[in-house]
Amino acid sequence: MTAAVVAPSRALDTASTPSTPSDAAAHEPTFTELGLPAPLERAVADLGFVTPSAIQAQAVPALLSGRDITGVAQTGTGKTAAFGLPLLAAIDPAQRHVQALVLTPTRELAMQVADAIETFAAHLPKVDVVAVYGGSPYQPQQRALAGGAQVVVGTPGRVIDHLERGTLVLDDVRFLVLDEADEMLRMGFAEDVETIFSRAPRERQVALFSATMPAPIRRVAAEHLVDPVEIAVARQSSTVTSVRQTYAVVPFRHKTGSLVRVLATSDADAAIVFTRTRGAAEEVGSALVERGISAATISGDVAQKEREKIVERLRSGALDVLVATDVAARASTSTASASSSTSTCRASPRPTCTASGAPAAPGAPVRR
Ligand code: AMP
């Protein structure tokens, strides 16, 4: 096993974190200076956002001025608000038809982005946001669309299904976002994305976000964006000095066994295991339970109330290990991290374990 101690860094890549040396002397913008309409500024203040993150400081004014943008930014940089706020500024709440479409690669991200946009819209006159994704019944989505939702956040496959059924019409879309575009192409959605672009009006604003900018993404941008403002923010990390990070490179078939051993030798009060997909979360959760570890799984499928119950069990000590997809965990575990000693393991594609609190005692089970 290899162990690594990481350098301290900030929880959010705010504009106060210079991405280039020349930024160091630059003036730090405030949300007021970004030019957002008052109801959006109020929503941001309600959320406790004080300083715009680097991507927000650059993307918001560009989008508000009507430009297309490409943003090289990862989750955790504040990119949802970077496009969500200007998107809401661009729509007319009085018009009861779809005016903005956000495409995301996964249902979890679609739900998360839709929730965030709803929160940003709290002080706007009635704006309806609907998340459309596969693996979930059509009817509630159809009802929300027919009810005049102005913002649609969806996965490409289900968006195409709604287009084909005639339940979604993009004729009046004026704002299109591709979130995690590299992931979308990696998952084979290139053709669906092309179809969706071809169904939207030529006169529209486009924001494309991607963690990386390989040639296929550049081609999409060259084809569908007009003279975009290109924004890149430094990779951000959310680790702090009190967190020790280690990782182990193990053959795929030994991953779960290794994870069990790591958990068995940790004396953390509680542990959170992150997986990339829902399927992996369920698989790892069952494997841990089979090996006698008190574990529960949460994913985007588990209702918020149920997630809260599971997190409460983790906090109270009734449960030792929580297995979760990143997105589900993000929405559920902020309270869990308040416990005195926690360890987290990323089980896929390479297991990464992070522990805070007391050092590991070999041989001791995960216990509180
Ligand atoms: P995102 O990268 O959009 O998923 O955002 C990551 C997290 O940062 C979310 O929990 C946001 O609510 C939070 N966040 C976004 N912008 C800011 C900001 N300017 N200040 C503080 N927190 C923020």
Image (tube, rainbow, N blue to C red):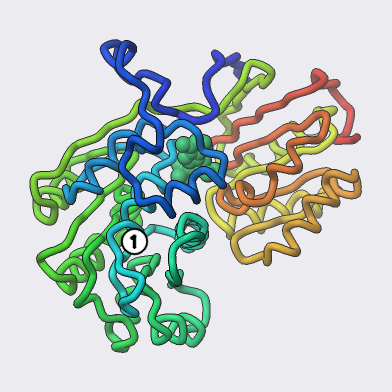
Instruction: For residue 133, say whether it is visible.
Output: no
Kindly identify the residue that appears in the image at 39 percent across and 87 percent down: 146
Q: Is residue 260 left or right of residue 331?
A: right
Kindly identify the residue that appears in the image at 42 percent across and 21 percent down: 16
Pointer 1 local density, CA inside 10 Å: few below 14, some 14–19, many at least 20: many
Q: Is residue 176 left or right of residue 260?
A: left
Look at label 1 and name its amino acid: Leu
Q: Nearer the viewer, residue 66 or 7?
A: 66
Q: In the rendered view of the protein, which quadrant contains the C terminus?
A: top right
Q: Is residue 272 left or right of residue 68?
A: right
User: Where does label 1 land, which residue?
Assistant: 103
Residue 72 position, x and y percent, is 29, 37
Q: Nearer the viewer, residue 337 or 352?
A: 337
Kindly identify the residue that appears in the image at 43 percent across and 36 percent down: 77
**354 to 304, vertically: above or below:** above
Residue 107 position, x and y percent, is 48, 63
Q: Is residue 196 left or right of residue 161?
A: left
